[in-house]
Amino acid sequence: MTVELLKKLCLVNGASGNESRVRDFILSEISGYCEYRVDPIGNIIAEKKGKSVAKNKVMVSAHMDEVGMVVTSVKSDGTLTVSPVGGIDPRVAVGRPVFVGDSDIYGVIGAKAVHNLSADEKKTAPKFDALYVDIGAEDKAAAEQLVAPGDFVHFASEFISFGDDFIKGKAIDDRFGCAVMIDLIKSELPYDCTFTFVVQEEVGLRGSRTAAFSVDPDFAIVLEATTAADIPLASGEKRCCELGRGAVVSYMDRSTIYDKELYGISREIASENEIKWQTKTMVAGGNDSGAIHISRGGVRTIAISAPCRYLHSPSCVVKLSDLEDCERLAGLMLEKMCMM
């Protein structure tokens, strides 16, 4: 995987329901390497020809959308009220720079000043209805010349490499998965395969539900980023998974009990090919597997995830070696599943 491709993907803004710019970028990357169509909800369904026809129909999927916010009103002083799009802890939002609307109007997320907080308010985290976006407008009339309710709000975040091959940026969940699929589409595959770049994962696995119904696969690989808690004050199973220990393959989360045979095969393939592999030590979270594995008559599904610190924030952190392990394992699992 090239870091440059991941950087370009992460810097494109595309909250759930507003993925058009991400979709356009992906289409510019895969055009000429496969046949594709865009379905009514906005998913890209790409058919990649391999050297041979596969015994089984395998779908590889990743979501294009990221967490963000949407403008709900313009206040008399020109500030904006917002609602989260996807799961954002409001504590990671206060003071963060953002882009508002299709014109990427610059703004900052604000909250009540600390000296105005009551004793009880100081003990609790703020809620989204107590936050606002300051775009520097003089008043409501000035703000309404620039933005309107329904405009999306995205975190403004630099993409930076730092330390020992660490990467920080927004939307690594799940532009990482999109980057892997672009790489696979551009490569020579041994067997035919279907790739789905899906929408609206962060608000309820919506795009993957329609994509899986349309594709009707026998097997599916979901590429994702998953929460790592390898940080101070977390120990034992609470660390969940760790950066630097390789690809994460789960046996169960809150939306899926994964195919047991595929889970075992992933361990064998990782061991045989010296790919670092780990599983999650907690049953937590979920991803598009939750919709895909129960589509139509059922789909045998596995998820391969990159461990990621500070998920759903402007500063997701991953390690390059883990991303590379995920991509290698995904390619080998794809080849195996095509002919099982």
Image (cartoon, rainbow, N blue to C red):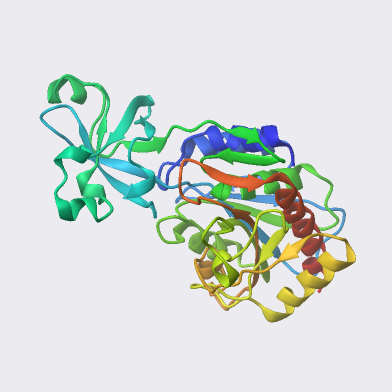
Question: Which one is nearer the viewer's eye here, 139 or 243?
Answer: 243
Seen in the picture, residue 33 relative to 40 is either above or below; the reply is above
Percent coordinates x, y for residue 265 in the rendering: 79, 74
Residue 193 falls in image quadrant: bottom right
At x 21% / y 21%, what residue is drawn? Answer: 137
Left or right for 181, reference 128: right
At x 17% / y 55%, what residue is drawn? Answer: 120
Task: Specify the quadrant that holds the N terminus.
Answer: top right
Question: Which one is nearer the viewer's eye here, 30 or 146?
Answer: 146
Question: Which one is nearer the viewer's eye here, 197 or 81?
Answer: 81
Percent coordinates x, y for residue 291 in the rendering: 51, 68
- Residue farthest along the left direction in this orientation: 76
At x 47% / y 35%, what residue is drawn? Answer: 13
Residue 23 falls in image quadrant: top right
Question: Which one is nearer the viewer's eye here, 268 or 293?
Answer: 268
Left or right for 262, reference 301: right
Percent coordinates x, y for residue 157 in the rendering: 48, 33
Left or right for 328, reference 288: right
Query: Does residue 192 appear in the picture of this structure?
Result: no
At x 68% / y 71%, what residue is drawn? Answer: 218
Task: Specify the quadrant that holds the C terminus.
Answer: bottom right
